Amino acid sequence: MNTLDLERMAVRDVNQRLHDDAAGTNTDQQYEILNPMGRHAIAVGLNHPFDVTVRGHAGYYCGSMNKEATVTIEGNAGVGVAENIMSGTVHVTGYASQSAAATGHGGLVVIDGDASARCGISMKGVDIVVGGSVGHMSAFMAQSGNLVVCGDAGESFGDSIYEAQLFVRGSVESLGADCVEKEMRPEHVERVRGLLERAGIDADPAAFRRYGSARQLYNFKIGNIGYY
């Protein structure tokens, strides 16, 4: 286990060490980052299958632009955790602030607690599993991927959604423009089951409801001007 202490190193130096090791010959691929103290941009842009544990709360954009690495945040995460993730896994054991996994193209993001507003905004293939609830405008302009919410969803859920699949076990305060509830078929139950298993969350996949696009806003229509 490699230990990087942010009381002794700058965030830039920690990130540089991770990138240098990815390009080098270090065979120990496990890292722990101590004393994050809410600092921003920890463990960003990783492109190697490292296993990185941040032992404490992280600030903005922790684990963003991740490729291949597994990043675990033992605490809460600030705005934009796992933003633009391409592959690998980012796991927040606490709560996440706004725009978790925004624009994510792939990989898995797990948040054990709640996620604030705009979780999964403009998601483009990432899978997101939230153990608690999500705030307003979550999955706004979500293009592809899956968002599983074990709690409730706030207002304007899935606004202007494209082809992402949304699953909620609790209540939805309101649906956004062009987002509708859809039939939960057996293949969707199995999809949710698989995502819950990958996230390590024990929940009944049959208890979820599915939401997706009504596909009425794909092309400009003057009659829909009020929704744009």
Image (cartoon, grey):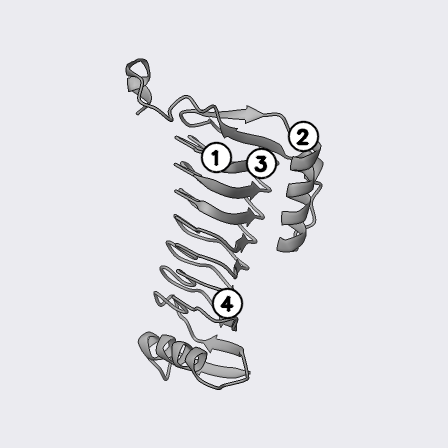
Residue located beneath label 3 in the image: 168
Mark number displayed over residue 163: 1
Is disc 1 in contact with disc 4, using a CB cutoff of under 8 Å?
Answer: no
**Tag shown at residue 69:** 4
The Cα atoms of the two marked residues, 3 and 4, are separated by 28 Å
Residue behind mark 2: 185
In what quadrant of the picture does the C terminus appear? top left
Which tag is nearer the camera, tag 3 or tag 2?
2
Marks 2 & 1, CB-CB < 8 Å contact: no
Mark 3 or mark 2, earlier in chain? 3
Three-letter code, disc 2: Arg
Residue 109 position in % (x across, y down): 52, 54
Query: Disc 2 and disc 1: Cα gap in Å?
Result: 16 Å
First in sequence, mark 3 or 4: give its number: 4
Front of the two marks 1 and 3:
1
Mark 3 vs mark 2, CA separation in Å: 14 Å
